[in-house]
């Protein structure tokens, strides 16, 4: 496992290179988080450089996160990524979604938030990997029971990559993290 000195968008390229090399070795897809589309664009470019033939599945932030009725990814970017072959998924965040609304309204902590905070003990990116895995499964974009390489980050960019077999949100404890390829210190 590679451990980056700190969480930083500067880790995006090396994280993608590590992840794509592993996905090529395993002959599997990559699934990554992206808000505005920059990480997805970078993944496409590096994937082409490295001869990656698998799918790039990009999980976007939900509508309303930026502001009511708004999404951080423009429609133009969304259309361009899809035209370039990226599979986009926009769905409620599996490890916050409706539960965050309840905890915000009633000032408590609930089981899914405890799970998210526990995963953050490893890194924010590991939490993101588990979350986007469930979201991709729920959307039917990954085959059941097959591993893929998942990428997440801390704030902007990517700094964590894991080999996982994802579970559906309704069966999230079926998720298996097989290998953490890289993460920040």
Image: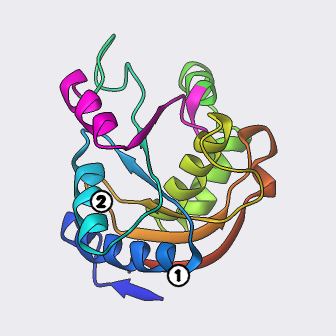
Q: Nearer the viewer, residue 149 or 67?
A: 149
Indicate the position of residue 94 as horizontal and vertical percent values: 61, 38
Q: State which tag comes first along the sequence, 1 or 2.
A: 1
**How many badges with numbers are in the image?**
2
Residue shown at 47%/54% (left/top)?
55
155 displayed left or right of 177: left
Q: Which mark is residue 43?
A: 2
Above or below for 37 versus 54: above
Please name the residue shown 54% across and 47% down the image.
132
Tell me how far mark 1 sits from mark 2, CA to CA.
17 Å
Above/below status of 150 relative to 138: below
Crowding at dot 2, Cα within 10 Å, few <14 / some 14-19 / many 20+, comes out as many
Magenta stretch: give its range. 74-97
Q: Residue at x 37, y 59 (%)?
A: 153
Q: Is residue 84 magenta?
A: yes
Tell me where residue 105 appears, x and y as whole percent: 56, 18
Q: Which residue is mark 1?
A: 25
Quarter occupied by residue 68: top left
Is residue 122 visible from the viewing direction of this image? Answer: no
Which dot marks residue 159?
none
The answer to which image quadrant residue 65 occupies is: top left
Q: Foreground residue, 37 or 26?
A: 26
Q: Quadrant of residue 165?
A: bottom right
Residue 66 x/y as whole percent: 29, 25
Residue 84 lies, in percent from the top left, at 28, 43
């Amino acid at each position: 496992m590679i451990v980056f000195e700190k969480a930083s968008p500067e880790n995006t390229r090396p994280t993608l290179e590590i992840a794509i090399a592993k996905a090529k070795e395993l002959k599997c897809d990559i699934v990554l988080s992206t808000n505005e589309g920059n990480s997805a664009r970078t993944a496409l470019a590096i994937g082409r450089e490295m001869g990656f033939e698998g799918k790039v599945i990009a999980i976007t932030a939900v509508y309303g996160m930026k502001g009511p009725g708004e999404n951080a990814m423009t429609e133009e970017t969304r259309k361009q990524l899809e035209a370039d072959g990226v599979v986009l998924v926009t769905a409620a965040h599996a490890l916050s979604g409706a539960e965050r609304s309840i905890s915000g309204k009633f000032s408590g902590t609930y089981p899914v938030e405890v799970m998210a905070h526990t995963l953050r003990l490893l890194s924010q990116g590991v939490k993101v990997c588990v979350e986007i895995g469930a979201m991709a499964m729920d959307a039917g974009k990954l085959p059941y029971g097959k591993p893929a390489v998942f990428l997440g980050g801390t704030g902007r960019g990517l700094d964590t990559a894991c080999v996982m077999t994802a579970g559906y949100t309704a069966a999230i404890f079926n998720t298996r993290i097989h290998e953490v390829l890289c993460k920040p210190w």
